[in-house]
Each structure stands twice: as C-alpha cells, then as structure tokens.
Image (cartoon, grey):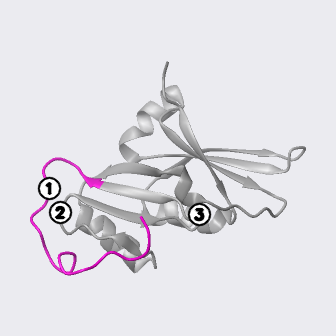
Amino acid sequence: MRYLHTMIRVTDLDASLHFYCDLLGLSEVRRMENEEGRYTLVFLAAPKDADRSAMERSPEVELTFNWDPEEYSGGRNFGHLAYKVDDIYAACARLQAGGVTINRPPRDGRMAFVRSPDGISIELLQEGEPLAPAEPWVSMTNTGSW
C-alpha cells in the first residue's frame, strides 16, 4: 500500500489556490476539468515532494471544486494536513501578511496551526530542531479553533 493524496472540497478555487500556493507554498502539479461531472480537480505538491509527485503522483493534495454551488460543513471533523517547513516563523509571517489568522502561534519555535479558506486545519512543523522562541510569536495567544 502507498499513500497517494488527500482530497479537500473547496468552495472558491481561486481563494484556495491563493492560500495553498501563494501563501503556504505548494505548487500546482496538474489540473483536470470534467465538463460532464461539472468539477475541477487541482493537484498540489510541496516543494520537497515535487520530484516524487512527478514520478509517482504522490504525495499530493487534491482540491476538488464542484461547479454547482454546494455548502460544506464540518472542516474540523476532517482533522488536519501537516507540513514541515524550513522556517516556521517566516512561514507564519508570510501567511499572516496574506490575511491568514494564526490559530496556534509557533510559541515553541516548533509547531503552529492555521486554517484554509474552507476551514481545513493545517499544522506547520519546523524542519529539524525547534527555533529559539521569538517575538511576536511567544506573546501571541491561540485564536479560534485549531
């Protein structure tokens, strides 16, 4: 058995691509549009997984955008996606500058949680050893659910 991808339904494809690609740092690796089924699939990969994604089509995140409006609830019951990042403080600063709320700041220099435009919880983990605690993160409190 081999892990392939996680599918997330999104309500606004442009907002989701902005979040996952422009702010979080994933890259679109392929896209499929199905006129008959009235949906678009966009597959994303983390930079350090790009080669593996190209060869194996894994590990990836699949954004599913249904063309006919549909309301989704319970993003929290999905659990969360997790990514290692090279610099957790820089990643959180980039996300925050893009308007993303840092639900659980990286006070310990090791872990943070943010949420996608569709309410999916994203865990960010520092690659390697935790960074030394630093402001403004040390003083920030949790916001919302994570």
Percent position (x, y) of residue 135?
16, 79
Residue 16, numbered label: 3
Dot 3 or dot 2: first in sequence order is: 3
Amino acid under disc 2: Gly
Secondary structure found at label 1: loop
Kind of residue sitting beneath label 3:
Ser
Spatial CA span between label 3 and label 1: 29 Å
Relative vertical location of residue 124 with respect to residue 98 in this rendering, above or below: above
Query: Quadrant of the rendered structure where residue 16 is?
Result: bottom right
Task: Give the amino acid type for the residue marked by disc 1 in the picture.
Answer: Pro
The residue indicated by pointer 1 is 130
**Which mark sits nearer the N-terminus, 3 or 1?**
3
43, 116: nearer the viewer: 116
At horizontal 48% and vertical 23% (from top left) the residue drawn is 2
Residue 26 is left or right of residue 36, and the answer is left
Find out whether residue 45 is within the magenta segment: no
Q: Is residue 135 magenta?
A: yes
Could you tell me residue 67's position as x and y percent?
81, 58
Discs 3/1, front: 1
SS for callout 2: loop
Label 3 neighbour load within 10 Å: few <14, some 14-19, many 20+: some
Q: Are marks 3 and 2 in contact (CB under 8 Å)?
A: no
The numbered mark at residue 109 is: 2
Disc 3 vs disc 2: which is toward the camera? 2
Q: Quadrant of residue 66?
A: bottom right
Magenta part of the protein: which range? 125-146
Q: Residue at 46% across / 79% down in the picture?
A: 99
Residue for point 43% across, 57% down: 122
